[in-house]
Amino acid sequence: MGTSFPYKIDTMEVLTLDTDDHRSCQVSIGPDIVRRIKDIVGPQDFDGVFLIHDPATKTVAAEISQTLDCQWVQELSGGESEKNLKSIGNLGFELLRSGATRKSLLIGLGGGVTCDLVAFLAAIYMRGIAVALIPTTMLAMVDAALGGKNGIDVGTFKNILGTIRQPDCVIIDPQLLSTLPDELVRDGLVEVVKKAAILDRDVFAGLRDRTSALNSRDPKALNYAIAAAVRMKLDVVRRDQREGGLRKLLNFGHTVGHALESLSQFSIRHGTAVAWGMKIELAMCPFHGQEVIDLLGEIGVDLEIPAALADPEKLWPIMLKDKKTAGNQVQIAVPASLGHGIVRHIEYADLVLSLDNTSIGAQRISPLERPFRFSMNLPRSKSEANRVLV
């Protein structure tokens, strides 16, 4: 049973995610709420509060530590290279040495890597302790801190070791984005476009209508994108926490995107990799997808894929290590139409053809001219989803 965080603060939206394993995650979205964190996480029956943060959040971390009287504060590099078992072992030892017990609260403050690593650590430390995540990047706010997928890497293979366990609390304060570089805000917007393209055409239209405002980082437009992304993801996870069907749609762009990240040895940002992955995967589906490509370009994503990475002979072996692989086929999620996704299996030849079309700017071959294999057609409505998942 998850820790209960019963609170309601004016000007803050609170969303609750209850899952089939009887855990409850409360997601709060609003301005300046980090500075009211004591109202959110307390009073509770914790015997200690422990904080892990990345370098960009030192000032906020010091404020939280003082407010909550944290027993232990640890700074991480925040880089992908830290998502490994060695780091987890070292952090676990430091928690133990600092007196953390099964009744302690662990807080993760930072970007996607920090949220991922801290949530994984909380899931396995003494078989599970309470965890609150405070994402400070756009990408973490709209995706990484949500949904309970917690993972670490094995070598250059992403998220091979992991758990599915919801955080007890996620605190999203859009004001923390004020010092974030434009390219990191753009990374998060890629994830919002991804969700809308495969889940909700109305949100996609809303993003398209707000392109100029998003590019100028208008607070109302960013709040719209964040809140829409949170609602879309929680709705999917609420119905399919363990990725038995509907949640697979959230992998749009990620199967190829993760392979691109690995091949680049994590020299490209996650948002860029996912955008390139979406472009390549769209070339393997019957939906033309030009609206999606256009919107990615309009928010400033560079969609030119370097030739060194657009190599099927190098990408395919990495993709075969993906968790969703079955035999010599790899599973991808793509839109069948705007806002409606499907899952299909691809083979090496599909990847070769797609890269030929996307990396050198060739015309897309009509889906009627090549074989196409669907593995599932996922529901449009909540009632249909419930019938599928029961």
Image (cartoon, grey):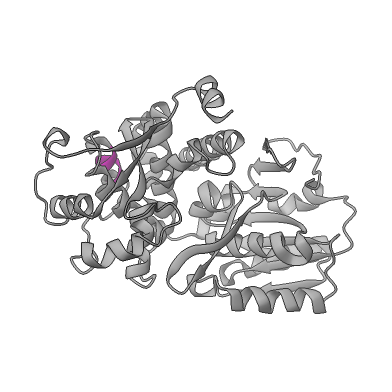
Question: In the image shown, does 6 or 365 lie closer to the viewer?
Answer: 365
Q: Is residue 134 visible?
A: yes
Say if 69 sits above or below 176 in the image: below
Range of the magenta residues? 292-296
Quarter of the image with the C terminus is top right
Residue at image coords 38%, 28%: 201
Q: Is residue 293 magenta?
A: yes
Task: Judge left or right: residue 133 versus residue 327.
Answer: right
| Residue farthest toward the top in the current orientation of the protein | 383
Apparent side of residue 49 relative to residue 20 in the rendered image (left or right): right
Place of residue 192 in the rendered image (x, y in percent of width and height, measured from the top left): 43, 42
Q: Quadrant of the N terminus?
A: top right
Tell me the chief SS of the magenta region: helix
Q: Looking at the image, can residue 32 be seen? A: no
Residue situated in front as seen by the camera: 20 or 168: 20
Residue found at the very far front of the displayed protein = 327
| Residue at image point 70% right, 43% down | 25
The answer to whether residue 239 is above or below residue 346 is above
Q: Is residue 225 above or below residue 320?
A: above
Residue 327 as seen in the image, left or right of residue 172: left
User: In the image, is residue 22 above or below residue 107?
Assistant: above
Q: Quadrant of residue 28?
A: top right
**Residue 105 within the magenta-colored segment of the rendering:** no
Which of the two residues, 271 or 300, is positioned nearer the viewer here?
271
Q: Where does residue 208 sit, x and y in percent of width and height?
A: 34, 34
The percent position of residue 350, horizontal first and vertical second, equals 21, 49
